[in-house]
Amino acid sequence: MKILIVGKNGQISWELQRCMPSLGTVLCAGRPEIDFINPDSLRQMVRVVRPDVLINAAAYTAVDQAESEPELTMKINGEAPGILAEEMKRIGGLMIHYSTDFVYDGSGTEPWVEESPTAPLNVYGAAKLAGDEAVRAVGGSYLIFRTSWVYGTRGRNFLRTVLRLAQTGEPLRIVDDQIGSPTWSRDIASATSFILARLMSHGESASRHRLSGAAEYSGIYHMTSAGYVSWCGFAGLILEEARRLGVHRGCTVQLTPIGTREYRAPALRPSNSRLNNARLHTAFGISLPDWRASLRMVIEEIAVWRSLS
């Protein structure tokens, strides 16, 4: 199998590059080799590599900045996925694409299912929804995994921000009326690898035909950690685990819950980001761990790194 990961330095991409090699030859492409706003650049990459599987882990993720860069956000998140899907359909390969809880408006308290009506509240969510729809419109073999509140030991994310701010000793004011599932980037990559391995096991011996049955699974699936919490609750456990493991002394800072209106971010966020993962489990027999268990593993990993540095 030849697997092409689009996007080099993102949280999910970094983890994918470490768990995918057991499935075949893994290639990774991103800036500066690819110009994500140039369709010809995207098409040329796929035509040269001719992968059996393309995993699109690239995205414009600066949610607030997207409000002032709607055209750029749409090109990267909305148009590029469709172009990649067209090229993969042309060569008979499988396209895997990551989406977001931001495609929903966040109303109510029930977990969203894949058939729930979409109504993004911001430019980022609208562009990601456009990307989902573009991939679906192309058809072929594709898997769209909608996840939420992604964090990890690398890149810009909520976990790293909380640990950095805690070092200042200043009180932290964190939104407490938005609910979702913090999801470790490694859990997403591991689940993707498991699903791809399962699809391969159902196929033929010849490389490209080993995924001949993937088309019957084509669709959108929610992929988040089990359990729900507010951003403030998430921050609270981050600080608690960091104190327990001695990550740094600054974790004794005061944590104050606030409402979304007090946060005053340029982009609106959904209040209810709960996603129902039943379809993923039914189709592939997999469920991601509880968010608390994964967070503890991440903090333990950070503690080990710091003890060795």
Image (cartoon, rainbow, N blue to C red):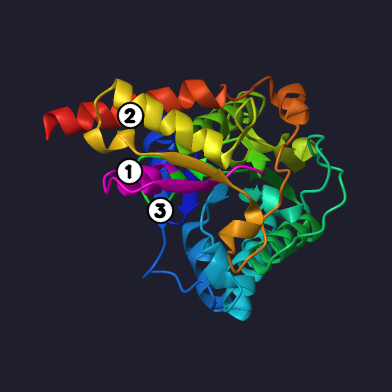
Front tag of 3 and 2:
2
User: Vertical placement of 97 versus 234: above or below?
Assistant: below
Residue bounds of the magenta highlight: 159-177
Amino acid type indicated by mark 3: Arg
Q: Residues within 10 Å of mark 1 (few under 14, many from 20)?
A: many
Whole-angstrom CA distance, mark 2 to mark 1, is 10 Å
Question: Mark 2 or mark 3, which is nearer the start of the sequence?
Answer: 3
- Magenta stretch: includes residue 11: no
- Label 3 residue SS: loop
Residue 245, percent from left and from top: 28, 22
Residues at badges 3 and 1 in contact (C-beta under 8 Å)?
no
Q: Badge 2 local density, few (<14 within 10 Å), some, or many (20+)? A: many
Q: Is residue 200 left or right of residue 284?
A: left
What is the x, y in percent for residue 8?
39, 55
Residue sitting at 32 percent across and 33 percent down? Answer: 252
Sequence-first disc among 2 and 1: 1
Q: State the SS at label 1.
A: helix
Say if mark 2 contacts mark 1, CB within 8 Å: yes
Please state the horizontal and vertical placement of residue 132, each as a whole percent of the image: 73, 56
Amino acid on which the number 2 mark rests in the picture? Ala
Mark 3 is surrounded, within 10 Å at the Cα level, by few (under 14), some (14 to 19) or many (20 or more) other residues, namely some
Q: On the image, numbered disc 3 is attached to which residue?
A: 156
Which quadrant is the C terminus positioned in?
A: top left
Q: Secondary structure at mark 2?
A: helix
The numbered dot on residue 212 is none
The answer to whether residue 185 is left or right of residue 106 is left
Evaluate whether residue 246 shows in this view.
yes
Q: Which mark is residue 242?
A: 2
Who is closer to the viewer here, 23 or 57?
57
Residue at which label 1 appears: 166
Nearer the observer, 208 or 103: 103
